[in-house]
Amino acid sequence: MLKKHMIPFIVMAALFILAKVFAYQMPQAKESLLEKENSDTTTTTQKAEIPEKEPISLMAQLNFAEETLPLGDKRIERKMKKTLAAHTYGHLQTHRLHRKAAEWFPIIEPILAAYGIPNDFKYVALVESGLQAGVSPKGAAGIWQFMPSTARMYGLKVNGRVDERYNLRKSTIAACKYIKEMYGGLESWTLVAAAYNVGDGRLRRQINNQNQDNYYKLKLNRETGGYVYKLISMKQIMEHPARYGYEKPKSLLAYNAE
């Protein structure tokens, strides 16, 4: 049994030890609280610094061969929207384009790639002959609508017995040779597409006369001036058919469908 005079000593010793422990833990607790506050502040700051992504407008998404439309030009935007509207299912009311794409693209795409030509040029074939077949008033014919003289120049046989302009593989190879040759001088795929429509020489003259090498700002005849817009519209309805009303039958929309 403890003596009475020992009890105050034990109490004092216990209080002394508790004071030491409390004094030791206080700075650590303070540091821990500070660290938490700093962490919360940093997290809040980081969250505040992350800007919200603005939705990309349709015009900013549109391009031909990775060459985009000039943004902010109201005239170009109006023209593009008008052309897109003309290519909805409600206006064209045909699945012929999707059938042709499913038939042609598996053959056209690897040939374009082999010649180093952007994949978007496959839409030239659809614009040229996807909706209408036959010979143009000027004599152009086949998938890529070659004139007889141009077809022969790039290795196709065109005579009374055979017309290789209708041979998908051979005419695509000829088209690639022609496209690649034009790109060597124009150095713009958009201009090459326009030249495919109007002719390389004619387009070069317009570029020189107007001192302008931006397709969208060149003053061209109505058909050529709208040609690349048609290609972009064709690309849109092939890649996003449902957006433009091409919904059924699904079997016809299997190629490049959303």
Image (cartoon, helix red, strand yellow):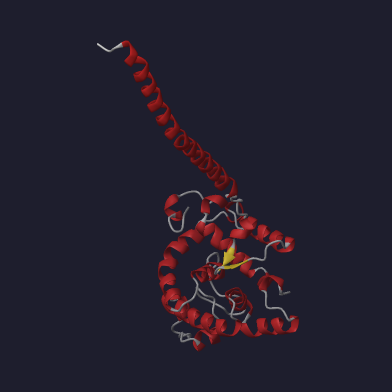
Q: Residue at x 48, y 59 (%)?
A: 98
The image quadrant of residue 92 is bottom right
Vertical arrangement, residue 26 with respect to residue 3, above or below: below
Q: Is residue 98 above or below residue 161?
A: above
Task: Tell me how many marks there are.
Answer: 0
Tell me which residue sits at (50%, 75%) in the image.
142
Q: Position of residue 257 (x, y in %)?
A: 46, 55
One can see residue 52 in this view? no
Residue positioned 56% across, 75% down in the render = 135
Give the vertical position of 201 relative to 17 (above or below). below
Which sits in the foreground, 105 or 40? 40
Let me know if residue 144 appears in the view.
yes
- Between 163 and 179, the residue placed more toward the observer is 179
Q: Residue furthest left?
A: 1
Question: Considering only vertical position in the picture, is 91 above or below 141?
Answer: above
Camera-nearest residue between 47 and 8? 8
Q: Position of residue 252 (x, y in %)?
A: 44, 55
Q: Quadrant of the N terminus?
A: top left
**Residue 70: x and y, percent?**
67, 66
Residue 217 sits in quarter: bottom right
Q: Is residue 51 left or right of residue 78?
A: left
Q: Nearer the viewer, residue 96 or 203?
A: 203
